[in-house]
Image (cartoon, grey):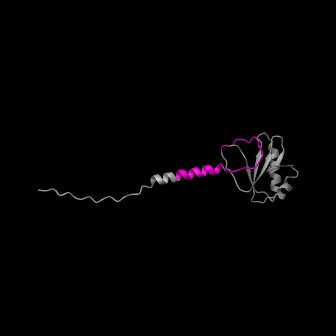
Amino acid sequence: MMKIRARRQPEEPEIIIIPMIDTMMFLLMFFIVASLALAVQNGLPVNLPKASTGEKHSAQNVTLTVDAAGNIHLNTRPITLASETQELQDAHVTAGTLVIINADANVRHGVVTSVMDNARKAGVERFAIATAS
């Protein structure tokens, strides 16, 4: 008696997309991390306090820098505490503008509070305190 072999149906070809998904996720993460390094912050060098949490902001921001001696700068231009409100209004700062405060770690808390108070008088509603990561 002869054995008859059953013919196998050829398997359908498969497209394995798991490695492609892994590669795309890697590229996505790479570009996210790379874009974070492109955020530029205008300001003068100060010794920022450390923070374990925080967010980086980038857009049309205004930077108020208070150095260790208590000098105040609007972006890179020196200003006085008394003229801060007028200087912010002259810079066309609106309620939606984010004001980043770069205060040296050795600056007294009262100075930073006065800077924020004057900015509120100019109409600023959004603040961020810069920290070293």
Q: Quadrant of residue 67?
A: top right
Left or right of residue 125, residue 14 in this image: left
Q: Quadrant of the C terminus?
A: top right
Q: Read off the magenta span.
A: 25-52
Residue at the image point whose x is 45% and y is 53% from the top: 18
The residue most toward the left is 1
Left or right of residue 11, residue 121 in this image: right
> Is residue 35 rendered magenta in the image?
yes
User: As displayed, is residue 39 above or below residue 95?
Assistant: above
Q: Which residue is nearer to you in this view: 69 or 112?
A: 69
Residue 5: x and y in percent read 20, 57
Residue at the image point whose x is 78% and y is 45% from the top: 44
The residue most toward the top is 106
Q: Which residue is nearer to you in this view: 58 or 121?
A: 58
Left or right of residue 7, residue 13 in this image: right
Residue 54: x and y in percent read 67, 48
